[in-house]
Amino acid sequence: QVQVVESGGGLVQAGGSLELSCAASGSIFGINVMGWYRQAPGKPRELVATMTNGGSTNYADSVKGRFTISRDNAKKVVYLQMNSLKPEDTAVYYCNVFLPLNTRNYWGQGTQVTVSS
């Protein structure tokens, strides 16, 4: 079993920065993907950024150049540095761990990010 816990988030003015952290625990072996998704009210959950344990990254077009994902494989922690935040970035941000070996997805409880204009 894998547990996922996010931290960070909060309220920030447009143009500001925030960093989210996510720690995973449990059985994570081999190739794995850790990343961030977000869900705004009335909208479906969408990918923000993901990163494999090999270092490959994937970003949503809407955050490219503003958000940076990084991870510490030894600690099983993934970070999301968010700069130049916009009101449309307001959402609940969820951490995800995906294990391709057994096609299992694990989610955190979510953390609220609110960007005021």
Image (spheres, helix red, strand yellow):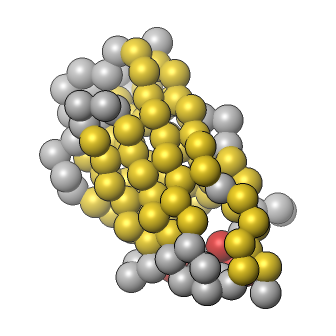
Q: Nearer the viewer, residue 79 or 91?
A: 79
From this viewpoint, which residue is outermost toward the left? 54
Q: Quadrant of residue 99?
A: top left
Residue 40, compared with residue 31, is above or below; it is: below
Provide residue 111's location: percent of width, then percent of height.
Answer: 68, 48
Identify the residue at horizontal 38%, vertical 54% (top origin).
50
Q: Quadrant of residue 90?
A: bottom right
Identify the residue at horizontal 72%, vertical 80% (top origin).
13
Provide residue 42's location: percent of width, then percent of height.
Answer: 83, 62
Q: Nearer the viewer, residue 18 or 104?
A: 18
Q: Is residue 116 left or right of residue 85?
A: right
Provide residue 48's location: percent of width, then percent of height.
Answer: 50, 62
From this viewpoint, which residue is outermost toward the right? 42
Q: Nearer the viewer, residue 86 or 105?
A: 86
Provide residue 53's location: percent of width, then percent of height.
Answer: 22, 41
| Residue 61 in view in this figure | no
Residue 2, compared with residue 61, is above or below; it is: above
Q: How many marks?
A: 0
